[in-house]
Structures are given as structure tokens and as C-alpha cells.
Image (spheres, rainbow, N blue to C red):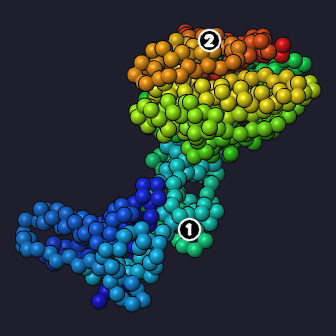
Amino acid sequence: MGEIRETAYLRELTATKQCELMFALKVDIESLGTLQEEMRAVRQLTDTVESLLQHIMNKIKHSIKVMKEQRSDCENKEVKINITLKKSSSRKHINPKMVLHDLINSTRNMEFQVFTQRFFVVVNAPLVKEMKLPLILYCNYSVQPIRLSMLFAENSVCQYSWYKSEDKLNWTKIANTYKYTIDDADIGHYLKLVCVPCNSILTGPPAEIVSENKVERMGTLPTCPFEERHRFTTEKLDKNNFRVVSYNILSNRYTEAKEQFPYCSPQTLAIDYRKQLIAKELTGYQADIICLQEVDSAIYTSYYKNEFKSKGYQSFYHRKGNKIPEGLTCFFNKSRFKKVDDHQIIYSTLIKNKSFTYLFNFVKSNVDLKESFMKQLTSLQVTVLKLAWKKNEYIVLANTHLFYHPDAELVRILQVNIATTYLSSLCGKYSQNGEKVRLIFCGDFNSVPTSPVYEYMMNKRIERSHRIFEKTRNNIDLSHNFQFESAYGKPKYTNYTDDFKDCLDYIFVEKNKIKVDKVVPLPTEEELSQHQGLPNDVFPSDHLALVTDLELV
């Protein structure tokens, strides 16, 4: 009988309610040669052991069939496949009718055998599901996985090793850290990261990823159009005036698909390049409040947070839906404001609150709408600031990035209705004792000026007879009680790509409480049309920053 030398991994996939068994099969089959294959068998948790083993057998049969088709000289005789799953201690077969969920949660010390190859079965061992490195690697910048997804692992105890090579054949170890700072000696080398996933009890199989390109040196940063905009923000504001920026800075997650921005070179699309331009642009505006959308959590933590802290800003970050590693950030000048509160709401979660029963009942009564609305993790970031130069006065700062899909106008109007309803209640809470409260609502609303969202914000109401409800059963009107003004009005472009050019971004203020003193002019159409689209080497995002000077009324 074969000696146990290998490990098979049995895991519960809670997100999909499935079970998987993974193992490296390597057996010699008479007259055919060696069958060598990484096997992965997946069944529902409600399936049985018998079902799992039969699934594996079917996979092996298929592989043997392929081997036979590739060999013209082999005998076409049936290959007997032997598969067993036993308890290691008693050597008794596992009950074939046992449900896989019960197997995972009640059985340990199992051994699995295929032909003569025997495996220890490790239950719920750590696993690297996905690991990816940046496409472009620049020296003198740190590198870490831009995507890292693991099961049953604790990042603090996982083992990381970095290697470099000029030919992807001969590798030299250079670090044992999660993050590696690339230096000049690495120029012209590929990098490889090996991760051994671990938790406090178990160690999983190692995974590795090799960079697509060699390390290179970044050139000198160019002069950019936003530097012309800085002429309007040479002075900081004081007294009752303050400057606000809203900017979708383009998440690195959405630049990974090469077809997304084909007109932009990988070198200028790289986050290490773009983040410097973004920081330079934002710094030059000398704003008191900055609201950003599509901020990568790793880049916020490793770069933006400290970069702006050194310039006198305090900041808060929230992942989209508390899950997706890009989200919303608020920076504010801590010499001018004091933070009272910061938090995030998720529209598809808040709608279940009893104060939104009217809206939830409407969503539930329309099957397609419910499916589309409830699966979104779209969020609203709220920061409450107290003015340092005035007593008992507050700024409620809202920041959002509404659902993007072009056919989702109804989802967006519901999201913004939840936002304004929630913000109205919050402003009421802070004004109970005579304090003055002013709302500023920033974001990428993914809505053009002719959209129902813009109509709702400016006209305070969307009636049940509106065209947006024409495909639904509706008995509700949507309204809010704010007197909003769009600081920029309806600019022609705030988003400019090769296949879409229009206005999607706004800074809404309460015009009865806040006066718009000026806005920093956006780049002209002539400037934008010099490029096929944004981003490019001088525009770091596909959106444009909105910058406005406001005055308290």
C-alpha cells in the first residue's frame, strides 16, 4: 500500500455554500503513462460523500479519456479507478451517505486514496484564492499585492517571501515581508512573491505570483493642466469662508482591465504614478475639506493618509459597503474644524430600517428592482464637523458614489432619497438645541444634469407619476426638505473618456445657509480634446476635481 506523503485540502466555501476537495494527482497508468493534474472537486454542502467521490471519479475518467485520445498505440481497455475516504484512526470508510457539511464540521484525521496515492486530509486549511501584483513596478516605491484573497488565513501570521530574476529562471531571495520597497538594484528584474497562508493552527499550500514586467525607473513628472487651476487657489481662506473639493480619483481596481483605458499607457495608468499627481493636484488647491471617491484602501493606508496628515489634515476612510477595498475618504483641515462624528451607511442595509418601511415595501413589490437594489453595496459617508471659529455651528458633510450602471436610474433615485432622508434626520438631531447646521453633499452621483437624480436634488421632489416609475407598481412620492444649489451648476464635463463625456459629479450646498463665492474653472473642452480621453500622462483620473469656495450665510 502506498505511503502517505501528500496532503489533500477539504474546505467549506461559506459564501457559495459549497465544499471543495483539492489535491495534486500523480499516478502511473499502465500503457498510458503518468496522469498528473491538480484536481479540484466542488459539491454543494448538502450533497453527500458519495456524490463528491463520484464527481472526482468522473473527472479522472475524463482525463484518462483525453490521454487515450492522444495515444494511438494504447490498448482501449477500461482503467479501474479506486477512490476511498477513510478515518485515519480506525481505517474505516466514511459513511458514503454522510452530508458534506457534517463531514467538514465533525470529522478530522481522514485519509483519502486515489489508485495507490494516499493523502492526509486537512480540513479548512488556509488557502490563497487570488494574488496579483501591479502591472508596472517602479523602483523607489513599495510594492505589495494589489489583490489578495485568502480563506481561513490570518494575514498577520502568513509568510511572505520576495525574489527577483532577470530571466524568470534563476531567482534570488530579497525580502521576507508583505510589502517590499523596490530599489535601484532591482531595475531590469522580474519580481516574484511567494505567500504561505497560515492561521494560528494550520499552514496551507504556498502560492506564488510573478510580475508581468521588469522593474523600471519612473521618469520626471510632467507639468499638468491642474497646475493652471492652482492659480485660483494660491491663498488659504479664513473667517467664514472655506474651500471644498470633491473628486473621483479612479480606483486602481478599475484600471487592471487592459481594455478599460486602451489609450492610456500602462506606465501612466500605474497607481504609483497617478497617486503622486493626485496628491500634487489636491495639495495645490489648499482646500479645507476634501471628499474623494474610489479610494483604494491599501493606497489610502500606505500613502494618502500620511501624505495629508503631514499637511495638517485629519482623515477618515470607509470601504464601499465595508467590504470592497475601494471607497470614500474625507480629509479636513484640523486647525479649522473639529470632528464630532464620522460613519458610513449602506443604502441596501438602511432601507430595512423601520423608518424606510414605505420604500422597502415598494422595492419588495418589484422583483427585478429588489434584486438590483439589494445586492448593491453603495454607501454614504457622513462626517460631522464643528467650526473652530464659531460656537455651536456644524457642517454635516456627506460623500457618496451612487451605483454606476447606465440603466439603473431608479436604483440611484432610491439611493439618493435614502441619503437625503437620513441626512435630514441627522441635521435635525444636531440642531435641537439651537445650533446652526449646514449640509454639504459631495460625490460622484453617476447622473447627468437631465437625470431624475439631479431633478430630485434641485426640485425637492419626484412624484409617483414620473417616467422613472413607468415599469413599476408605485404608490409613493419621493421628496426632501433641503434647498440645494449645485455649486458648479451643470458643467459640460466632469467625466471624460473615449466612450463617455458628460457631467456626473456635484457639490450640492444649502443655498439658504451657504453662499457659493467662486468655483475653480474646469479644464476647457479644447484642453480635454487634446487627449483621446482621461486618464493620461497629465490627468490622473477619468474624472475632474470640483473645487469651490463657500461662505457661511
Q: Which mark is residue 469?
A: none
Q: Is residue 209 left or right of residue 241?
A: left
For this rendering, which residue is in front, 211 or 92? 92
Nearer to us: label 1 or label 2: 2
The residue shown at (31%, 74%) is: 97
The residue shown at (73%, 23%) is: 440
For this rendering, which residue is in front, 463 or 106? 463
* Amino acid type at image mark 1: Cys
The part of the image, by quadrant, that contains residue 342 is top right
- Name the spot of residue 62 as percent of width and height, x first: 19, 63
For this rendering, which residue is in front, 162 or 480? 480
The residue shown at (36%, 88%) is: 91
To which residue does mark 2 refer? 459
To which residue does mark 1 refer? 198
Q: Is residue 124 left or right of residue 244?
A: left
The part of the image, by quadrant, that contains residue 378 is top right
SS at circle 1: loop
Quadrant showing the C terminus: top right
SS at circle 2: helix
- Name the spot of residue 453 as percent of width and height, x first: 56, 19
**Crowding near pointer 2: few (<14 within 10 Å), some, many (20+)?**
some
**Crowding near pointer 1: few (<14 within 10 Å), some, many (20+)?**
many
Quadrant showing the N terminus: bottom left
As measured in the structure, the alpha-carbon distance from the residue carrying label 1 to the one carrying label 2 is 55 Å
- Is residue 145 something that shows in the picture? yes
* Amino acid type at image mark 2: Asn
Q: Is residue 256 above or below residue 292?
A: below
The residue shown at (58%, 74%) is: 201
- Name the spot of residue 450 as percent of width and height, x first: 52, 12
* Disc 1 and disc 2 in contact, CB within 8 angstroms: no
Which numbered disc, 1 or 2, marks the residue that appears first in the sequence?
Answer: 1
- Name the spot of residue 344 as percent of width and height, x first: 67, 39
